[in-house]
Amino acid sequence: MISLDNVTKSYGARTLIEDATLTLGPGERVGIVGPNGAGKSTLLSLILGREQPDRGAIRRSKGLTLGHLPQAILTTPEATVLETSTRPSGRLADILGDLERLPAEIDGATTDAEREALSTRLADAHTAFSEAGGHDRESRARRILAGLGFRPGEEERRLGTFSGGYVMRAELARLLVDLPDVLLLDEPTNHLDLESVLWLQGFLVQARSTLLIISHDRAFLDATVGSIVEVDRRQLTRYAGTYEDYVRERAARRSQLEAAAKAQDRRIKQTERFIERFRAKNTKATQVQSRIKALAKEQRIEIHSESARVKLRFPQPERTSDVALRLEAVSFGYADEPVYDGLDFRLERGEKTVLVGPNGAGKSTLLKLLGGVLEPTAGERELGLRATIGYYSQHRHDLLALDKTVLENARAAAPDQTETVVRTLLGSFLFRGDDVFKPVSVLSGGEKSRLALARILLAPPSVLLMDEPTTHLDIPSVDALIQALEDFEGSLCFVSHDVHFIRRLARRVVRIEPGRVTDYPGDWAYYVWKHGQEVAGGEAPAAARSSSGDGVPVGERSGRGRRAEKRAAAEARAERTRRTGPLRAELTTLESEIEGLEAEKARLESQLAAPETYENPDFDVASAQRRHAEIQADLTARMDRWVEVQDALETAESDLSD
C-alpha cells in the first residue's frame, strides 16, 4: 500500500530521517511517537508526497486516497461549518466535477455516438457518487460535527466566527466524512475536549481506513493503534502493540542493549589482555594477529543517552483549612445566556478533582470562577485559611507576555527571586543558556506550556486550577507533570481531555452539563461505571471503552501478548544460560587462577632477583626455582585453556544471536 525504502530527508545540515524503511498495509493502525523536532510531521509530509526524499524511494498504491489533518490550518472564514465539513476532496471531488460538467457536454454533443458515450459516463458518475456515500454526506456530516462538539445550529454559522480549535474540528469532520484510504492525523486531540476525544476514539476504532496518528495522548493511542513507530535520532523503529506495549518493549530492548554493551566491553578487555600477554610470544603470533584484526573490525555498541526531560516538583504548600475554596449560591452567565444559577461548589484540602462534561457546558467557566478570573453576578467565592490560588489557562497567551523574553516572564512571576534561582528553575524546564532570552512570541506550543508551568512553580499555590494542562506537552513532560501532581499535597481541580492523565490523578469527578452539576466521589473508573449505568442501563458508553480495533480489548490482547513474550524470553534465557553459563563460570575461575599465579610468579622473581635473598641461609633457592618453573607451566596451561574457552564462548554467543 505504502512503502518507504531507505529514505533520507535533510534540511540544510540537519538530517531528520536517514535510511528509513517502513511498510504500511491496508487497515493498519500506527501511532507515531518521538521527541519534539525529531521528524514526526516530516514523516507524514513525505508519505503525503508534499516533501520529497533526498535519497530513497516512497511508493504508494495506484489510486490511493490520503487525508491529512495538520497541527495548524488556514481558516476558510466565508464558509459555514457544514460547508467546510462537506467540502469534497480526492475521488469524490472528481466525481462531482463530472456530474456538474457532463450534462452541458451532452447538450453540446454533435453526434449520437458522442452523446451516448457522455451519457454512459454520467450514469457511471451517478453510480460512483452513490457508492461513495454522496447522497447522505450532509446527514453524516451533521452526526460527526455533533460528535466533535458542535452544538445544534452551529453547523450553519460561518467558520470565521469560531476559534482556531473549532476550525480544526471542522476540518477533522471533513476528513471523517470522506474517510480516505489512508488517514494521517497530527495531534488530533489537541483541540478537543474529553467528550469529543472519546467520541473520536470510538469512531476511529470502527473506521476501516489505514491510520497514522501522531499523538501525545497515550490513552488515545492505546485505544486506536496496533503498532508504534518511534522517530528518534534519524531512525524509524517499529514496535508491535499499543503504546504501553511499546514502553515495555523499548525498555527491554534498551536493557538488552546495555547488557550487550557490557558484555562486548568485557570481551574487548579480555582480548586486549590476551594480545598484551602474548604479543611477544612466537608460538601465539597467529592467534594474537587474529585477535588484533577481529578487534579492529568489531563494531562498538553505542548506548545513546536519553533525551533531556522536564524535571518537575511542586513545592509543598502551607496547610490550609479543611475547605480550601468554596462557591456559595453563585450565578454567572454571558450576555443573555446563563451558565450557572445558585451553584454551590467546594474544594477540600488535598482533593484532586477533574471537571468533565460536554463542550460548552461551563467547565472552563467554573475554573475561572474558582480562580477569581471571573466575578459571579450573584453569590460568593470564599478562600480557605492560608489558601493561595494558581490558575493555569488553556490559552497560554493569557498567562504570558508575548513581547517579553522567557526570563522576563519568569521573573515577573517571582520578583523577589534572584536571577540565578529563576534560571536554575527554567533549566529544569529545558530553557537553557541563551534560550531564556528568546521572546515568548517565537516559542512553540509545548515551550509556552512549559514556561507557564515554570511560572506556577516560582510562586507555588495551595490551590491549583488547571485548564487542559497537557496540551502541547510531549509524553515525557506529561509523565513528569503527573508525578509532580501526584506528590502535590495541595488542592487540585482541572479540566483535561487526556484519559491517562485523568486516570492517574483524579479522585473525584464532577460532571457538568447545562443546568446540572453531578458529583461522582470516586476515580475515573468509578465515574465511567456509574455514569454508564445512568445513561446506558448498566453498560459504560462505547466511547469510554478501549478497543484494539479488531474486537479484542486492549488490556486482554496486551495481556496475552505479554505472557507469550515472557515465555519466549524465559526460554531464550534458559537456552543461553545452558549454553554459555558453564563457559562463563570457567572463564571467571581461570582468570582468578591466572591472576593468583602471576602474583606469585612476580613475588618469586622479585625474591630471586634480590642479592640479600642469597645471604639468607633459611631461603631454599632450588625450591624457589622449581616452584617458579611449576608456576610458568601452570600459567601456560591455564592461558591455553582460557583461549579455548573464550573461543567456545564466542561461538556459542554467535549461534544464539543467529
Image (cartoon, helix red, strand yellow):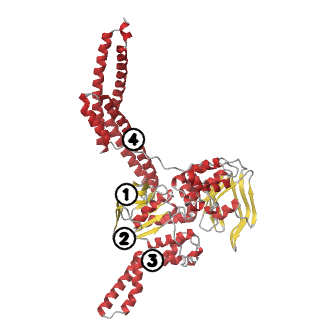
Which residue: 57% across, 53% down?
434
Of the residues shown, which amino acid type is indicated by label 1? Ala
Q: Is residue 616 above or below residue 465?
A: above
Amino acid marked by disc 3: Pro
* First reached walking from the N terminus: tag 4 or tag 1: 1
- The residue singled out by tag 2 in the image is 64
Q: Residues within 10 Å of mark 1 (few under 14, many from 20)?
A: many
The spot of residue 162 in percent (x, y) is 59, 72
- Mark seen at residue 480: none
The residue that disc 1 covers is 20
Closer mark to the observer between disc 3 and disc 1: 1
- Residue at 30% of width from left, 33% of height from top? 646
Give residue 383's quadrant in the image. bottom right
Q: Secondary structure at mark 2?
A: loop
Q: Amino acid at mark 2?
A: Leu
Specify few, some or many for label 2: CA neighbours under 10 Å numbering under 14, 14-19, or 20 or more.
few
What kind of element bears circle 4? helix
Residue bearing mark 3: 88
3 or 1: tag closer to the N-terminus:
1
263 left or right, relative to 392: left
Question: Residue 96 location in percent, x, y?
Answer: 42, 81
Amino acid under disc 4: Ala
Question: Mark 3, residues whose alpha carbon is within 10 Å: few (<14), some, or many (≥20)?
Answer: some
Q: CA distance from mark 3 to mark 2?
A: 16 Å
Q: Is residue 550 visible?
A: no
Residue 559, horizontal then vertical, whole percent: 43, 51
Tag 4 residue: 261
Residue at the top extreme, as displayed: 617
CA–CA distance in space, label 4 to label 1: 24 Å
Image-quadrant location for residue 27: bottom left
